[in-house]
Image: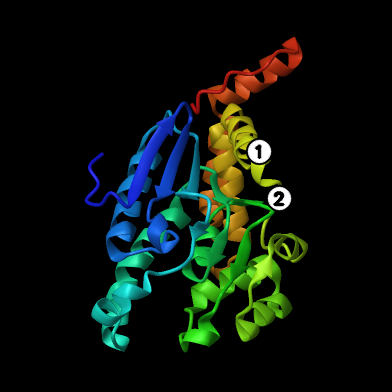
Amino acid sequence: MQLKTDKMIAQKEGSVGWMIFNNPARRNATSLEMWEAVETIIDDFAADPAIRVVVMKGAGDKSFVSGADISQFEEKRADAEAAKAYSKNSESAKQKLTELRKPLIAMIRGFCMGGGLGLAMKADLRIASDDSQFGIPAAKLGIAYSFDSLKALVDIVGPAFAKEILFTGRRFRADEALRIGLVNIVVPVEDLEKTISEYAEAMSANAPLSITASKVTIDEVLKDREERDTALIEELNRRCFDSQDYVEGRQAFLAKRTPNFTGR
């Protein structure tokens, strides 16, 4: 795949696709060009049947993603109209992440702030090192987040903690983030990559159609009842029970062997 910026890196290692935010000089703050590259990377990973899990991380050891690159604000987000145009591009990339039907893991080390935390909330699992810090400093910058962004936060931590995060704008330690449900797992720095690999390998070994059905159904559960696509849920369930993987799963269970799922 061809990327127009070196500030995003895509790597494929076996069944895992790695998407790396490569702007360590600015603590991996995101630029417009980086969001455009995210779309390209996710499209490629989504279309590649060999990739079963996607992991996103920040380059270096200081930050996952610290938020938007404020150096671009003067030029590309100077007022409401310019901010709207910028957001259109970044929201398109975020929508790709939302629509990805493969498991998405956020590997978090260091700062995970503002838009970076919003990005991490797009992941299905957030696994963090014990030196990570989290926060949304919107109140310190005089900015506001969209309904969808705040709904995602409320869905994860609940309204009380969402208000604390937003009203104070303070930084939360990794253990606090774990306590309020903002992250799934916190591990020592030296165990982070090993833990990510173990989770990615475990997911990759499971039936892709089953994981897709579970992911989509959970996302539909979080929607208002009138917005839920029950037909899609039924179709994904039907595909599972009509699949070769369902046959393989049964046979492997009876034979007491490890199943070999193909996603068909």
- Local packing at callout 1 (Cα closer than 10 Å; few below 14, some 14-19, many 20+) is some
Asked which secondary structure carries label 1, the reply is helix
Can residue 155 be seen in this snapshot?
Answer: yes
- Local packing at callout 2 (Cα closer than 10 Å; few below 14, some 14-19, many 20+) is some
Q: Nearer the viewer, residue 237 or 69?
A: 69
The residue beneath circle 1 is: 195
Q: Quadrant of the N terminus?
A: top left
Asked which secondary structure carries label 2, the reply is strand
Whether tag 2 and tag 1 are in contact, CB under 8 A, the answer is yes
Q: Residue furthest top?
A: 255
Q: Is tag 2's residue or tag 1's residue first in the polypeptide sequence? A: 2
Rendering colour mode: rainbow
Residue 128 drawn at (x, y percent): 64, 52
Residue 162 drawn at (x, y percent): 66, 77
Q: Quadrant of residue 71?
A: bottom left
Can residue 224 be seen in this snapshot?
Answer: no
- Work out whether 59 lies above or below 155: above
Residue at position x 59%, y 30% in the image: 201
Residue at position x 57%, y 43% in the image: 213
Residue 249 drawn at (x, y percent): 65, 22
Q: Is 95 situated left or right of 82 in this image?
A: right
Residue 119 drawn at (x, y percent): 49, 61
- Work out whether 126 lies above or below 91: above
- Work out whether 231 lies above or below 258: below
The residue beneath circle 2 is: 185
